[in-house]
Image (cartoon, helix red, strand yellow):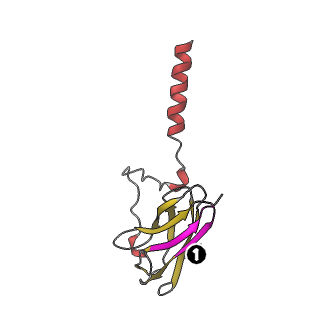
Amino acid sequence: MKKFLGILFIAGALAACNDVDKSKVPPVNASTGTQPAEDTTQYTSIQWLELDKNMGTINEGQQLDVAFRFKNTGDKPLVIRSVRPSCGCTAANPPAEPIAPGAEGEIKASFNSQGRTGTNKKTLTVVANTKVSTTHELHFEVEVTPKKS
């Protein structure tokens, strides 16, 4: 009985690990067994007005807001698909709407300094419909001083 329960547990664990959000995975072409290629004709170009920022010094517990400006230098709407912070202490807020050609936008983030004394170097990984590379990295640094007792 123990052996059966062990096998059942392992099978359940393997099934849970295979639980992928199918809505985010492009459908597979039944005849070729491949996923369709992305439409790169809708890609544009981006100019980062700010890639790296030194935010100075803040006190522990203080919330730090940071924004990175960019410009759509292409001829198609710029779509920011995702922004992934390097850790849970930072939350990102990408633009909700596509950025028109020639227009500027910004990616906002907020850093929670609670329990993060010392030098903090954070990265935001941006994925967009951009030529050359769809992935971009933004960096900010902040010094957090301990709370005074």
Q: State whether residue 88 is above or below residue 50.
A: above
The dominant secondary structure in magenta is: strand
Q: Secondary structure at mark 1?
A: loop
Residue 80 is one of the magenta-drawn residues? no
User: Residue 44 appears in which quarter of the rendering?
Assistant: bottom left
User: Residue 12 appears in which quarter of the rendering?
Assistant: top right
Where is residue 65? Give x, y as percent: 59, 71
User: Which amino acid type corresponds to the residue marked 1 in the rendered image?
Assistant: Glu
Q: Nearer the viewer, residue 43 or 108?
A: 108
Identity of the residue drawn at 46% across and 73% down: 54
Identity of the residue drawn at 49% across and 33% down: 14
Residue 60 is one of the magenta-drawn residues? yes
Q: Nearer the viewer, residue 2 or 21?
A: 2
Which residue is under mark 1? 97
Determine if residue 55 is in view: yes
Report the span colored magenta. 53-67
Determine if residue 99 is in view: no
